[in-house]
Amino acid sequence: MSFATLKRNRGSNINKIIKAAEATNSGETKSYVDDRIWKPTVDKAGNGYAVIRFLPGTEESIPFVRYWDHGFKGPTGQWYIENSLTSIGQPDPVGELNSKLWNSGIESDKDRARDQKRRLHYVVNMLVLQDPSNPANEGKVFLYKFGKKIFDKIMDSMQPEFADEKAVNPFDFWEGADFKLKIRNVEGYRNYDKSEFAAQTPLHSGDDVKLEALYNQLHDLSEFTDPKNYKTYDDLKAKLGRVLGEEAIMSGAPTMAQTAQMNEPAPAPVQPVTAENIPSEDDDTMSYFARLANED
């Protein structure tokens, strides 16, 4: 920064210093905001509305990716917010710890495992058609992250329950459908039950010039499951130990619950719960898209 710039900005520097100090004192830093990601806006009552269009994948790729993360606050007051290595088919220290807690047979351990469980996210490319709270977003391509509720609606559109309903691929430029996102506040949580697809219609009236322009704006989704964008097992395990303040557990020593069970009669053998053998409700979904890819 030049002297002239320093002099010109002297009035605003104090605010920058104060904000930096507050972030330092709180032990937190401002998180990076990815302006590629669109987030719906809700009013004071927690309600929101927008119309969007899900877009196809690039090349021959599936039009979405899924990944898991963990987000919880430890007894130390520190937060653990990290992507789970299970997203890329690798062992994850939180998943392993949760398996031990769940299999301990102690209800308090199970509660802790629930609090630390992994969270499922889907990411797609989408076009904003209507965004009443932020009209400047309309006509732009964004990434959109959402959970199982919205993804279930996508799957329902492609796999209708009744014979008189036509299967619709919502990611298709020409034979897809707009999605009316309706958000309500239900008992303090965002609820998407009222969200629905509109009638099947070509995007931009099927104008190939406009559609190709959109296609060229699609973001590469592979970064969300690229191993190089994930921390190593050892790094995550070290952070987990700091957040929990339980170095003994992280080093492999038995938990309190496990120690308490050492003198109890052994129960009848059961199949232990692990991150690997828990049935995934999304397996059929991935198989469905794999079939679609093979049919093209």
Image (spheres, rainbow, N blue to C red):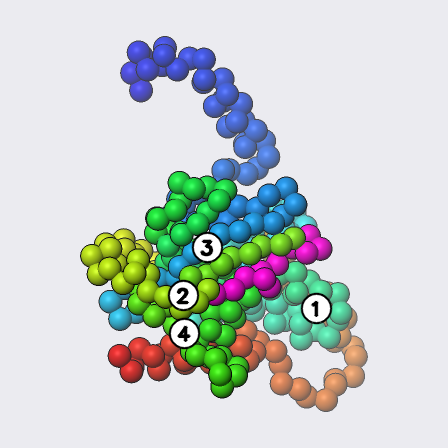
- Residue 168's label in the rendered image is 4
- Residue 110's label in the rendered image is 1
Query: Is residue 185 something one can see in this rendering?
Result: yes
For the residues bearing labels 3 and 1, Cβ distance under 8 angstroms: no
Dot 1 crowding, Cα within 10 Å, few <14, some 14–19, many 20+: some
For the residues bearing labels 4 and 2, Cβ distance under 8 angstroms: yes
Q: Residue at x 65, y 45 (%)?
A: 45
Q: Residue at x 48, y 44 (%)?
A: 132
Q: Inspect the image, locate mark 4, and give the three-letter code of the amino acid beneath it.
A: Val
Residue holding disc 3: 51
Question: Residue 66: image x %, image y %?
Answer: 44, 66
Question: Residue 19: image x %, image y %?
Answer: 52, 27
Residue holding disc 2: 177
Q: Can you say whether 219 is above or below 177 in the image?
A: above
Q: Inspect the image, locate mark 3, and give the three-letter code of the amino acid beneath it.
A: Val
Image quadrant where one finds the C terminus: bottom left
Sequence-wise, which precedes: disc 1 or disc 4?
Answer: 1
